[in-house]
Amino acid sequence: MRIVRKMAVAGLVLGLGAVSIAAQASDDPIETRKAIMSSVGAAAGLGGGMMKAEIDYVPAAGKAAIATVRAASLTFGDYYPAGSDQGDTGAAAAIWEDPDGFAAELAKFQAATEKAAAASGKDGPADLDAFKGAMGPVLATCKSCHETYRKKN
Ligand code: HEC
């Protein structure tokens, strides 16, 4: 399942034209989780841009942003093996010190993306208001996880 999921994420990322696919195929968990988060960042950039009306809203783009965060929320937590707190990573030590707390943040992220994906439907949210309703709660989960589980830069 992991390989299939990774390919799905990579495909979506390709669609957004955002991230190097080489990193997705890497065996390095740090590179992989950073690439997944980078795709989340790209989806948030696209979604935020449409919410602020800097980018015209199109249902297919709304769907791409939501599908990207959905896939990322399902795979992101798989790349925190012991020892991967060391290296070129923005992951905070709290992830390994408080795995239950991190799992709870992941669960919030997954619950928000699940609702968004359900609201997205086959063709994406029909209009900008529907997209805001679906994507807004997903964007609200970034900060609460980063606050504790991502290093401050
Ligand atoms: C469950 C926790 C969690 C949630 C939710 C989360 N992030 Fe992250 N994010 C992290 C962690 C941990 C890192 C650091 C990963 C590393 O460097 O190993 C990170 C890193 C990033 C990065 C840097 C990626 C890179 O290239 O190094 C971006 C951009 C990002 N997050 C955006 C977002 C956005 C936007 C959202 C909300 C839509 C979000 N994140 C939600 C935990 C989370």
Image: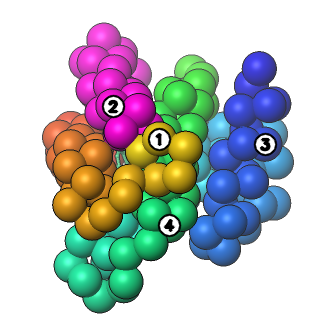
Secondary structure beneath dot 1 equals loop
Confirm whether the magenta stretch covers residue 107. Answer: yes
| Disc 1: which residue | 121
Q: Is residue 64 left or right of residue 6?
A: left
Residue at the (37%, 58%) spot, across then down: 126
Q: CA distance from mark 1 to mark 4?
A: 13 Å
Residue 28 percent location from the top left of the image:
73, 42
Q: CA distance from mark 2 to mark 4?
A: 17 Å
Which dot, 2 or 1, sits closer to the camera? Answer: 1
Between 48 and 79, the one lying in front of the other is 48
The magenta segment is 96-119
Q: CA distance from mark 2 to mark 1?
A: 10 Å
Which dot, 3 or 1, sits closer to the camera? Answer: 1
Quadrant housing the C terminus: bottom left
Within 10 Å of disc 1 (Cα), the crowding (few <14, some 14-19, many 20+) is few
Amino acid identity at mark 4: Ala
| Disc 4: which residue | 61
Tell whether label 3 touches label 4 (CB within 8 Å). Answer: no
- Outermost residue toward the top in this view: 100
Above or below residue 58? Residue 23 is above
Q: CA distance from mark 3 to mark 2?
A: 22 Å
- Mark with earlier residue (4, 3): 3
Which dot, 4 or 3, sits closer to the camera? Answer: 4
Within 10 Å of disc 3 (Cα), the crowding (few <14, some 14-19, many 20+) is some
Confirm whether the magenta stretch covers residue 86. Answer: no
Quadrant housing the N terminus: top right
Query: Residue 132's quadrant in the figure?
Result: bottom left
Chief secondary structure of the magenta portion: helix
| Disc 2: which residue | 115
Amino acid identity at mark 2: Lys
| Disc 3: which residue | 7
